[in-house]
C-alpha cells in the first residue's frame, strides 16, 4: 500500500512551536491531511518521551498507535470522511550538532528515527552525557555529526540517520554558512552509512539530482512542522508493508518502494533565493554574482540561498531530469482558500471553517489536492477551489521566491482581476 510519510516534526517542547503539537494534535491533523506515518519528533526531551510512552502503544513491528481510548475521543470530533484513515507513529528527533571541523564552526541538523522506545532510552542515555536534553525539544549538542552517527548506530543498528534540510544556509550539511561541500567531508569513513537526505523546503529533488555526489541516495521530504496544521507540507511516498523494517528499507536502499516525494514549490521556501530581509533585497544567483555577493543597500554580504549553493556544487545542468522518482507539488489547502478569500492569514477562523467544509465533503487534504477529480470538487459546491486546484496540478501558478528567512509567495491567481475572471468563467460553466 502507498504510505505518506512525514518523519520530521516537532513537539510543543521545541522552541517556537504551537501548544497544539501534542500527540493528540498530531493524530487529529494527520487524519485531516491524509498522512499515514508521522514521526514523533523530539524524543530526546524527557517530558515528551514520557508523553509518548503514556499515549502511544505498539502497533505493527516498529510502529506505534494512539491508545484506543484517546483515539476514539478524537475520532468523534473528525469528519466521517477521514475517520478511517490510519495513523501510525515512529520515534524521531532532530539534533542540532554544533562543532568545529576543518577550521570552521559547523552547525548541522540531523534527523534520527528508531523502531522502539528501548532504542530511544539508549540514545538518550548516551546523549545526556554530552548536553542538556531538557533545554529544548531539538537539543543543541557539541558533537561532531560523524560521532553522532556513530553513537546512534551503536545504540540502534537499524536506526535511520538523515541529514536534515541539507541546503539550508546555517544548519544544512551543504549550507552556505556552515556546511560542507561533500558528504565525505562531513562523515568521513562513516559516509556509506548516509543513505538518505532531506531536501528541505527551499530545494526539490530536481535540484539535488544535479549533484553527482548524491547519486544513489534517497531524496526525501518532510514538513519540519512546528504546528500540527503544517504537517505534510512536504512528505515522502512509500509503497510497502506497514512495518518499520519495510519503511526504513525503502529509505536505505532507495529501491522501487520509495515512490517519490510531495513538495513545497521550492521558491516558497524562505532560503531559496539570495538577499537581505532588512534591506528588501532579493537576488537571483546571476544578480548575486554581478554584485559579488554584496548587498547594494547596506554593502554587507548577502545571505546566500539554496539556489545559488546548489549551482555551486552541481555537476549537471538545471534541466537535468533522470526521471528517477515521482515528484508532486502542492500548495496547502488553507493557503489556497486564503488566496481565494483575499485573506492574508491562512490560519484565520474563516479559512479554517472553509477547510472543515471541504474536508467533510471530499476527504483528506492530500486526496483533495492530488487525486480527487476536479469535476467532483466542483459538484460538491467548491467551484472556485476546483479551478484553483486544477491550476495547481497544471503548475499554472505565480512564484515569488523566498529569501533570507522570508517565505516565498505562491499564487494560483496573479491578482484580484484574474480571480474575478475565473469566477465569471465559473458562472458561465
Image (cartoon, rainbow, N blue to C red):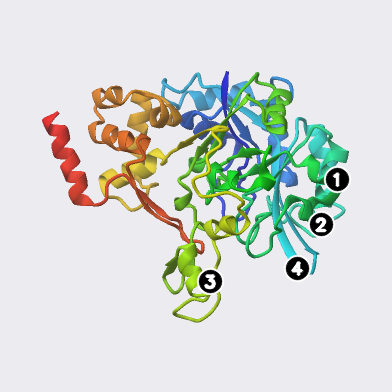
Q: Please indicate, yes or no, whether residue 178 appears anywhere in the rendered image.
A: yes
Q: Residue at x 81, y 49 (%)?
A: 148
| Real-space CA distance between mark 4 and mark 2, rounded to the nearest whole angstrom | 14 Å
Labelled pair 3, 1 in contact (Cβ < 8 Å): no
- State whether residue 68 is above or below residue 427: above
Residue 357 is left or right of residue 45, and the answer is: left
Residue 7 is left or right of residue 317, and the answer is: right
131 vs 405, nearest the viewer: 405
Locate residue 267, reporting x and y percent. Answer: 45, 52
Mark 3 lies on residue: 302
Mark 1 lies on residue: 151
Mark 4 lies on residue: 104
Locate residue 385, reporting x and y percent. Answer: 28, 35
Compare marks 4 and 2 and give the one earlier in the sequence: 4
Number of other residues with Cα within 10 Å of mark 1, as a class: few under 14, some 14 to 19, many 20 or more = some
Locate residue 4, reporting x and y percent. Answer: 56, 29
| Real-space CA distance between mark 1 and mark 2, rounded to the nearest whole angstrom | 10 Å
| Real-space CA distance between mark 3 and mark 1, rounded to the nearest whole angstrom | 37 Å
Compare marks 2 and 3 and give the one earlier in the sequence: 2
Amino acid at each position: 500500500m502507498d504510505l505518506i510519510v512525514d518523519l520530521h516534526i516537532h513537539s510543543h517542547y521545541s522552541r517556537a512551536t504551537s501548544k497544539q503539537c501534542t500527540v493528540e494534535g498530531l493524530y487529529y491533523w494527520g487524519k485531516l491531511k491524509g498522512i499515514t506515518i508521522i514521526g514523533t519528533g523530539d524524543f530526546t526531551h524527557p517530558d515528551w518521551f514520557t508523553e509518548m510512552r503514556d499515549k502511544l502503544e505498539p502497533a505493527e513491528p516498529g510502529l506505534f498507535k494512539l491508545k484506543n481510548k484517546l483515539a476514539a475521543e478524537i475520532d468523534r470530533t473528525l469528519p466521517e470522511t477521514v475517520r478511517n484513515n490510519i495513523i501510525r507513529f515512529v520515534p524521531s528527533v532532530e539534533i542540532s550538532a554544533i562543532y568545529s571541523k576543518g577550521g570552521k564552526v559547523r552547525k548541522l541538523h540531523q534527523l534520527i528515527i528508531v523502531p522502539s522506545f528501548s532504542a530511544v532510552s539508549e540514545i538518550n542515555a548516551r546523549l545526556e552525557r554530552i548536553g542538556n536534553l531538557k533545554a529544548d525539544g531539538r537539543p543543541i549538542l557539541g558533537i561532531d555529526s560523524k560521532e553522532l552517527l556513530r553513537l546512534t548506530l551503536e545504540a540502534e543498528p537499524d536506526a535511520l540517520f538523515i541529514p536534515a534540510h541539507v541546503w539550508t544556509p546555517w544548519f544544512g550539511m551543504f549550507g552556505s554558512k556552515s556546511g560542507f561541500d561533500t558528504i565525505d567531508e562531513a562523515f568521513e569513513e562513516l559516509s556509506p552509512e548516509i543513505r538518505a537526505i532531506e531536501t528541505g523546503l527551499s530545494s526539490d529533488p530536481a535540484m539535488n539530482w544535479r549533484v553527482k555526489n548524491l547519486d544513489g541516495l534517497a531524496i526525501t521530504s518532510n514538513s519540519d512542522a512546528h504546528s500540527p496544521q503544517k504537517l505534510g507540507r512536504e512528505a515522502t511516498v512509500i509503497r510497502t508493508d506497514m512495518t518499520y523494517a519495510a519503511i526504513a528499507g525503502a529509505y536505505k536502499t532507495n529501491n522501487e518502494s520509495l515512490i517519490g516525494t510531495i513538495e513545497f514549490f521550492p521558491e516558497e521556501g524562505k532560503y531559496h533565493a539570495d538577499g537581505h530581509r532588512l534591506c528588501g533585497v532579493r537576488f537571483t544567483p546571476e544578480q548575486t554574482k554581478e554584485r559579488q555577493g554584496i548587498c547594494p543597500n547596506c554593502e554587507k554580504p548577502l545571505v546566500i540561498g539554496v539556489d545559488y549553493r546548489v549551482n555551486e556544487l552541481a555537476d549537471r545542468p538545471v534541466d537535468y531530469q533522470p526521471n528517477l522518482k515521482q515528484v508532486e507539488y502542492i500548495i496547502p489547502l488553507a493557503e489556497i482558500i486564503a488566496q481565494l478569500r483575499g485573506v492574508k492569514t491562512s490560519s484565520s477562523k474563516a479559512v479554517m471553517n472553509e477547510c472543515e467544509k471541504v474536508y467533510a465533503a471530499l476527504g483528506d487534504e492530500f486526496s483533495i489536492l492530488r487525486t480527487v477529480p476536479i469535476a467532483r470538487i466542483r459538484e460538491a459546491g467548491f467551484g472556485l477551489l476546483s479551478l484553483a486546484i486544477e491550476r495547481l496540478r497544471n503548475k499554472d501558478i505565480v512564484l515569488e521566491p523566498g529569501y533570507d528567512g522570508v517565505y516565498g509567495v505562491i499564487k494560483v491567481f496573479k491578482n484580484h482581476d484574474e480571480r474575478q475572471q475565473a469566477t465569471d468563467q465559473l458562472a458561465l460553466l
